[in-house]
Image: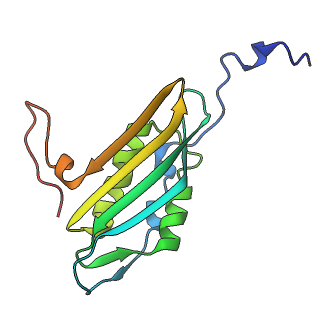
Amino acid sequence: MDVTDTSYAQGRVLAFERPEAIGTRLLQTFPYRGPRQRILYETREFSAVCPYSGLPDYAVLRIEYMPHRRIVELKSLKYYLVSYRNVGIFQEPATARLYEDLWALLKPEWLSVRTVYNTRGGIDATCEVNSELAAVRPAGQPRRRAPR
């Protein structure tokens, strides 16, 4: 193969899984009865796959919440996050999905999920969904409260 001929990569898309492969069932919790506190988890190892190219998108993921009665078990959270590794999902829907899954699992007082993706094509992308933003809908759509 002539390594100076890049035509072999033109139009190539690597295989990836659909969002149904995200391991929501892996998440586990344990009860919390302590004082009000803000919990922060951060990882620089979050990755999913660009559905156009099949190439990985890497991000710093920051999950911050105030528990109501449940706390997510960290090993289960890590397995859940790793389940995104081969899933083709755009950056914004990935952030929204993380928020929705964690909200449904924990039903916290407050939750924020923020992804800061590595630069691609000269563009930096940061996505965030939090309890205040999730309660606001665009004009013409009914306003809803964050799920309880």
In the picture, the quarter occupied by the N terminus is top right
Where on the picture, by quarter, is residue 37?
bottom left
| Residue 79, image x, y percentages | 54, 64
Q: Is residue 133 above or below residue 74?
A: above
Nearer-the-camera pick, 49 or 59: 59
Query: Of residues 51 and 40, which is closer to you in this image?
Result: 40
Residue 32: quarter of image:
bottom left
Q: Residue at x 24, y 67 (%)?
A: 107
The image shows a total of numbered marks equal to 0
54 relative position to 132: left or right: right
Q: Which residue is located at x 50 percent, y 70 percent?
A: 76
Q: Residue 88 in the image: x percent, y percent?
A: 52, 39
Q: Where is residue 70 shown, x and y percent of the image?
A: 30, 77
The residue lying at 51 percent from left, 51 percent from top is: 21
| Above or below for 59 versus 45 | above
Instruction: For the C terminus, give its image quadrant.
Output: bottom left
* Residue lying at the far right of the rendered structure: 1
Q: Quadrant of residue 143?
A: top left
Tell me if residue 127 comes above or below residue 25 in the rendering: above
